Amino acid sequence: MPEVIVVGAGPTGLMLAAELRLHEVDVVVLERRSEPTRESRGQGLHVRSVEIMDQRGLLDRFRAAGEEFQVGGFFGGITKPWPDLLDTAHPYGLAVPQPVTERLLEEHVVEAGVDIRRGHEVVGVGQDEDGVSVDLADGSRLDARYLVGCDGGRSTVRGRIGVGFPGEPSRVETLLGEMRLTADQTEIDAVTARVATTQLRFGAAPLGDGVYRVVVPAEGVSEDRTAEPTLADFQQRLRALGGTDFGAHSPRWLSRFGDATRQAERYRVGRVLLAGDAAHVHPPTGGQGLNLGVQDAFNLGWKLAAAVRGWAPEGLLDSYHDERHPVGARVLDNTRAQMTLLGAEPGAVALRGLLKELMDFEEVNRYVTGMVTAVDVRYDLGEGHDLVGGRLRDVRLGRGRLYELMHGGRGLLLDQGGRLSATGWADRVDHVIDTIDSGEELDVPAVLLRPDGHVAWAGTDERELAGALSRWFGAAAD
């Protein structure tokens, strides 16, 4: 019997499985699709996700498969130069199509021993105080200790456990797909530039070999959101707005998306948890969806592993909802704002112009960029040093880089003075006695990092440190 069942083999589910395997948790991933998706809704990794891949030793794989980009602001159709002094050692994003991201993560989790079962559709969920069970479409049943629904916006898991999904339905809808265009690049650029003066959700981005990623506003919200659009739908909307369909043919995949914003009322019900789109849906403005899900998994993985392994202190698993629900709510709000800015109404155009001027100020650009790239996420962990709650950027130490020491997914006590102790937690926390490179800035002698890289404590007091270790890593070993 597996210890954890993960439903959904998208980026969120695969990242969660990878985090659980770092702690030797037995994981089964159930995916209803028989083959990996070809759709590439997510187009890359923002800064915080790049940092996450570095913290787990996966960044080289992603850098080899993607291209670095720097777009400051990147908010509601507004782009600005990359801001100075963004708090990261990785001041870039990585353009990586979602199918590639899923392939790289799947290769990693298979290497780690995760059992991925494709063509397994979950139709029922049950739980009691001892464990969970899932019923599959083929009539079989699988039991485990915990279950995590990473099965998308129409989550079966969320529905079966009765968690509400309040929010707003779609008001505008967009067609998105990849297809070949026969028009020359000059014509495509000219038409896109003309239409985009009033319709920012219009464009055709070259992917190579005559294939383009095409986005175009739909005529109205489809009555059946599950119905796949056709090539004729794209051609009709391209002609209506641009006067030409660019000779579109041979689609790779076609889809539609709306601007619905919804969030699960709870991320945990007993032994069942929700992550990624199963916990929140929002428009893809700013490219935050895939990243938000990966970051959910990064927060949840070590906490769930602690519960499975029996050392989780009281409230640790509940802190997943407490920390990630506000982050999700903030993303929903910023995508609502961006959809307003993308509108063609005079008020939206005026507001976009005003914000564009404001983002010429470095502080505003850095604030917006930090929000979209998630480097400004700070959890409310109570009183303490200013660093507490935020994630720590990669810093250079005498023995190398900080993130290189975090590949195992354990806690880390960085002790520059060598006068502290984490002996009772040595099975869960690495005690690193080292000094930070003189070119770096960290105005505190020691910090305790959780496995997700967020600062749990900073200072010099041994008693305070012991309290933080107990709070996040359970009781000290005898």
Image (cartoon, rainbow, N blue to C red):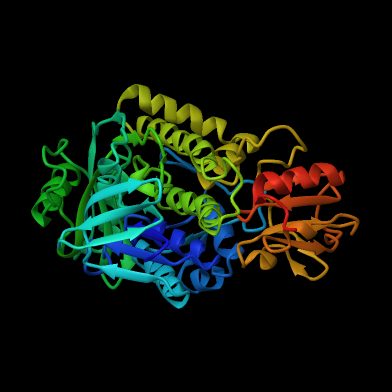
Tell which of 37 and 301 is nearer to you. Answer: 301
Residue 18 against residue 155 in the figure, above or below: below
Please give the count of numbered marks on the rendered protein: 0
Q: Position of residue 396 (x, y in %)?
A: 77, 63
Tell which of 19 and 85 is nearer to you. Answer: 19
Q: Position of residue 108 (x, y in %)?
A: 46, 73
* The residue positioned farthest toward the left in the image shown: 232
Q: Residue at x 30, y 62 (%)?
A: 30
Q: Position of residue 58 (x, y in %)?
A: 54, 69
* Left or right: where 179 falls relative to 378: left
Is residue 274 in view?
no
Is residue 226 in view?
yes
Tell which of 331 and 211 is nearer to you. Answer: 331
Q: Position of residue 179 (x, y in %)?
A: 21, 63
Quarter-of-image position of residue 268: top left
Q: Residue at x 45, y 34 (%)?
A: 329
* The residue positioned farthest toward the bottom in the image shown: 111
* Left or right: where 219 falls relative to 80: left
* The residue positioned farthest toward the top in the image shown: 347
The quadrant of the picture occupied by the C terminus is: bottom right
Tell which of 369 and 105 is nearer to you. Answer: 105
Residue 59 against residue 241 in the figure, above or below: below
The quadrant of the picture occupied by the N terminus is: bottom left
* Left or right: where 272 falls relative to 125: right
Quarter-of-image position of residue 141: bottom left
Q: Residue at x 22, y 39 (%)?
A: 173
